Image (cartoon, rainbow, N blue to C red):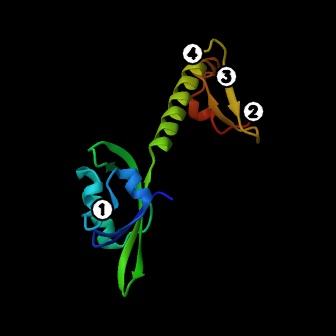
């Protein structure tokens, strides 16, 4: 699990070790803190809307650590009964590694596309059903067709 906080309209009343490790705040610092302070000002309004509306799907924001450094964050909250009240439990997930993987994949896709597009020969990629899912510019030139006339056709 990531960092978990139980809060009452944003005020943290319970937190786990994961949240202290992720944010650099001690347990004692977190208890009583406005949980919105763990979120960058540019994303606080969205987080507040989700708290007020009871939104329960994960969403991305930017987190702030005790040392003021920031990191990509995924947040997911849910209303729960807690000691006779209805409060909100929220999980904070540091998604730095996921974002790095996404950047690597995107960079690889761009490089791959550039290699294919600058090839001297015409090039097409088909899926396992034999449907063309990608072509390079040279194949379009050779065929005299538009890209949309080639993509989706069978090899």
Instruction: Specify whether residue 155 is in view.
Output: yes
In this rendering, the label closer to the viewer, 1 or 4:
1
- Give the structural element (helix, strand or loop) at label 4: loop
- Left or right? Give the position of 154 relative to 58: right
If you read the primary sequence from the N terminus, does the residue marked by circle 1 or circle 4 appear first? 1
Q: Residues within 10 Å of mark 2 (few under 14, many from 20)?
A: some
Q: Position of residue 79 (x, y in %)?
A: 40, 76
Instruction: Specify whether residue 92 is in view.
Output: no
If you read the primary sequence from the N terminus, does the residue marked by circle 3 or circle 2 appear first? 3
- Asked which quadrant contains residue 92, the reply is bottom left
Quadrant for the C terminus in the image: top right
If you read the primary sequence from the N terminus, does the residue marked by circle 4 or circle 2 appear first? 4
Q: Residues within 10 Å of mark 4 (few under 14, many from 20)?
A: few
Q: CA distance from mark 3 to mark 2?
A: 12 Å
Residue at the disc numbered 4: 118
Q: CA distance from mark 3 to mark 1?
A: 57 Å
Residue at the disc numbered 2: 155
- Asked which quadrant contains residue 90, the reply is bottom left
- Give the structural element (helix, strand or loop) at label 2: loop
Residue at the disc numbered 3: 123
Q: CA distance from mark 1 to mark 4?
A: 54 Å
If you read the primary sequence from the N terminus, does the residue marked by circle 1 or circle 2 appear first? 1
- Give the structural element (helix, strand or loop) at label 1: helix
Circles 4, 3 touching at the beta carbon (< 8 Å): no
In this rendering, the label closer to the viewer, 3 or 2:
3
Tell me the residue at 48%/35% (across/down): 103
Residue at the disc numbered 1: 30
Q: CA distance from mark 4 to mark 2?
A: 22 Å
């Amino acid at each position: 699990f990531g960092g978990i906080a139980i809060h009452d309209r944003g005020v943290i009343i319970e937190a786990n070790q994961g949240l202290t490790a992720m944010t650099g705040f001690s347990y004692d610092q977190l208890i009583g803190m406005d949980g919105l302070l763990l979120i960058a000002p540019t994303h606080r309004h969205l987080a507040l809307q989700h708290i007020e509306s009871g939104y329960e799907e994960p969403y991305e924001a930017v987190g702030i650590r005790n040392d003021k450094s920031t990191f990509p964050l995924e947040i997911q909250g849910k209303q729960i009964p807690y000691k006779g009240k209805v409060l909100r439990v929220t999980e904070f997930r540091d998604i730095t590694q996921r974002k790095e993987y996404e950047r690597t994949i995107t960079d690889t896709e761009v490089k791959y596309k550039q290699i294919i597009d600058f090839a001297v020969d015409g090039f097409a990629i088909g899926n396992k059903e034999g449907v063309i899912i990608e072509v390079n510019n040279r194949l379009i030139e050779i065929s005299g067709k538009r890209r949309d006339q080639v993509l989706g056709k069978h090899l």
